[in-house]
Image (spheres, rainbow, N blue to C red):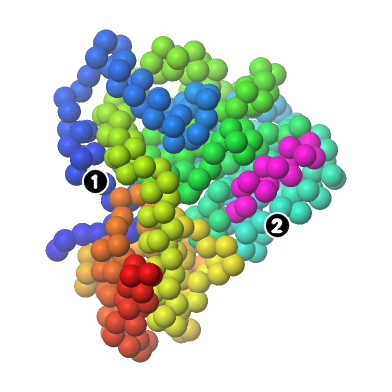
Amino acid sequence: MKKYLLTPGPTELPARVLLAMAHPIIHHRAPEFLPVLEQAREGLKWLFKTKNEVLILASSGTGAMEGAVTNFLSKGDKVITVNAGKFGERWGQICKAYGVEADVINVEWGQSVDPEKIKEALQKNPDVKGVYFQATETSTGVVHPVKEIAKIVHDNSNAIVVVDGITGVGVFDLPMDEWGIDILLTGSQKALMLPPGLAFIGISDRAWKLNETSTLPRFYFNFSKELKNIVKNQTAYTPAISLIIGLGESLKMMKEEGLENVYKRHTLLAEATRKGVQAMGLKLYAPKSPSNSLTAAVAPEGLDSGKIISSLEKDFGIRIANGQDQAKGKIFRVAHMGYYDKSDILFMLASLEIVLNKLGYKVESGIGVGAAEKVFIA
Ligand SMILES: *Cc1c(COP(=O)(O)O)cnc(C)c1O
């Protein structure tokens, strides 16, 4: 059976990227590797919209998250974190592991954080070193107001703005320098059309200043060491060479499409998906601020979302994701970030209609697909 991956990471890979990665291995200290890394480096600056270097790490996204704590803070420092789901919770867990005191702003699942809450927390703790949050909270499908938060943080404190953009970068605009995002990080397996295994982190001058006085223990994720290397088109340790070759190709594809068109495509696919599931009578889990990277929909009353997910897999070879923790069994999550097109959305919605009907939830054939078609025709 033909397989389709519509999970919020890993995501589908273009044949061009797969073929690029089949290139024989190059030694990373050999002259042939320098232009490969240089091209990836320039491409990442273009994608992050920053004049500063974007470091390339051999790890999943969480490695960059951990490094975003250990390279800028010291034991006993205070930070603010936003916990609106699983990934926001992770910022708090990393801080705890390193003895950093986190003032956690808890947000109801499915809601985005109110920037005023961050302002209040900053006024209560004017000496916080950083504000850590997500661009998209992937566990609930919500998008946080990154631009507004960055402004509030800079207007009210000297804290750095740290954005986990793992499901934001390459989906919607997150111009680092223009918005004053001090740290922006992402992983390879979401919108960047690559397998898992790389993390990327852009760092502002303000954050580099903090790095000079930060004393938390670190070894592998040592960003000042990585910076010294990347300016020479090198990495401190053996890089994931094949993945970096793939990155060169995926960045090339994004450049060919044009960044604004990449964002427009994601907006269109997300809009069609939302309209499609709503036309089937399903509710969005994050109705007020849904992200364009994935759609989280609430399963019909009395129907375990796990059944929808396993039926889609069994009958159509489509893999989507369940909810996590409190949302498990209640919602399903369909990703449309990275290598996806209109045809993927139409196929997924049609399959979902069939599966829902088979599971006893009556949906008029074509009603979801029709709603998506209208978005594409308009
Ligand atoms: C996927 C994801 C992560 C975790 O990334 P790993 O690559 O699994 O370490 C972190 N934050 C967000 C918002 C994500 O979507």
Give the overall secondary structure of the magenta segment: helix
Q: Residue at x 29, y 82 (%)?
A: 366
- Please check the rendered image and state whether residue 85 is part of the magenta-colored stretch, yes or no: no
Q: Quadrant of the C terminus?
A: bottom left
Which element type, helix, strand or loop, lies under badge 2?
loop
- Position of residue 268 in the picture relative to residue 183 (left or right): left
Q: Is residue 30 visible?
A: yes
- Position of residue 74 in the picture relative to residue 71 (left or right): right
Q: Is mark 1 within 8 Å of ligand 1?
A: no
Name, please, the residue furthest toward the left: 1
Q: Earlier in the sequence, mark 1 or mark 2?
A: 1
Residue 18 placement (x, y as % from top left) = 21, 39
Residue under label 2, please give it.
114
Q: Residue at x 32, y 44 (%)?
A: 257
Label 2 Cα crowd, 10 Å radius (few <14 / some 14-19 / many 20+): some
Q: Quadrant of the N terminus?
A: bottom left
Q: Nearer the viewer, residue 173 or 61?
A: 173
Q: Nearer the viewer, residue 242 or 38?
A: 38
Which element type, helix, strand or loop, lies under badge 1?
loop
- Which amino acid does the dot numbered 1 rest on? Pro
Name, please, the residue furthest toward the front: 378
Q: Residue at x 40, y 18 (%)?
A: 235
Residue under label 1, please give it.
14
What is the distance, in whole Å, between disc 1 and disc 2 at their CAs?
Answer: 37 Å
- Which amino acid does the dot numbered 2 rest on? Asp
